[in-house]
Amino acid sequence: MKFGIKTLDDFQLENKTVFCRVDINSALKKDRSGLADISRLKGCAPTIKELAERKAKTVLLAHQGGDLEYHNYYSTEYHAAELSRLLGWEVKFIDDVCGPFARDCIKQLRPREILLLDNVRYMAEEMTLFETKLNLPPEEQAKTLVVRKLAPLGDLYVCDAFAAAHRAQPTLIGFPEVLPSAMGRLFEREYSILSQIMSAPERPCLFVLGGAKIQDAFLMMSSVLRAGTADRILTGGLVANIMFLAQGVAIGKASTEYIKAQNLWDYVEIAANILARHADKVELPVDLAYSAGGERQEAGLDNLPGDHLITD
């Protein structure tokens, strides 16, 4: 046990059916013919391989794509093929999550076999709108369809999806209510590193915050600046756009309207407060990227295109 959380070392795995939640959400190739990046698959591969080597019957649960934008909302079939290649071990795939076919396949698993279920976000209960509108506590998440159908078939739940572990969704917080649970090796490593950074960081300590999901970024930014954990923060993407607006920099109509449409305008004031206190520690980009005709373009702050969305 580490940090009050059980690890794989706390369980005997042979002949046990293990539901392992991983975060292998990956960018797809433009023509959707495969995965453009397999970094996350490499990250969780050690946990999956250990489960197989210790003779568990491993069932992988994963999502693919942002369920609000649907940019890469897709099946996890490609992921099974890539995991098979990375592990040197067959990872079977079925296009079902918790229906009769999925349950039959799980019952038929033998020790050392690995099965990847289809995208758990095909289940409405696993989607962001279900999460944000209902905000169900863990004990209620355990009553959702995916947990009620699958949990009776399992002996252990393993969460190796550290990057998604903050989400209040059934496959992340429902299963631990009804099954013995542990963190996987990737989760264990990430948690250990983050704990070290937050308690006694090596100096200089730099945080790089970007992307489109800014709520957690601003929460973390305020926390690590206030605590003195961060020596500098490098911003990009929507985080930087919000910071520019807080400074009065025009980022163009497309980006400004996007921020308003996403109900993120309140973060402009939060950004202004952060800059008022810690402007010397926050670095903003000197040039930015945008997409035009499907191609990446770059521009300086003095010639940003108003009709194109500024991105990372």
Image: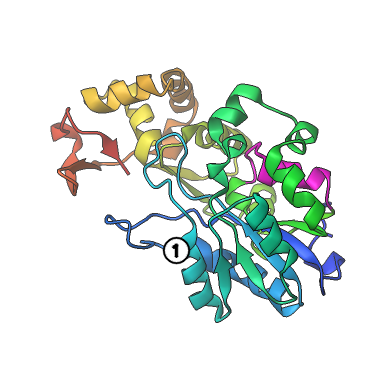
Query: Magenta segment range?
Result: 165-179
Number of numbered labels in the structure image: 1
| Residue 81 rendering spot, x and y as whole percentages | 47, 70
At label 1, the amino acid type is: Tyr
Decide whether residue 178 is among the magenta residues: yes
Q: How is the image coloured?
A: rainbow
User: Callout 1: 10 Å neighbours few (<14), some, many (20+)?
Assistant: some
Say which quarter of the image contains residue 156. Answer: bottom right
Q: Residue at x 60, y 22 (%)?
A: 133
In the image, residue 302 lies in the stretch drawn in magenta: no
Q: Identify the image quadrant of residue 285.
A: top left
| Residue 208 horizontal side relative to residue 3, left or right | left
Q: Which residue shows up at 62% across the image and 35% down it?
A: 125
Q: Position of residue 139 (x, y in %)?
A: 80, 34
Quadrant of the image containing the C terminus: top left
Q: Position of residue 191 (x, y in %)?
A: 68, 54
Q: Could you say which is closer to the camera, residue 28 or residue 110?
A: 110
* Residue furthest to the bottom: 88
Q: Is residue 189 visible?
A: no
Is residue 307 positioned above or below 165 on the image? above
Please report the residue visible at 14 percent of the width from the left and 43 percent of the height from the top: 293
The quarter of the picture where residue 300 lies is top left
Q: Circle 1 — which element?
A: helix
- Left or right of 70: which side holds 2? right
Residue with the mark numbered 1:
78
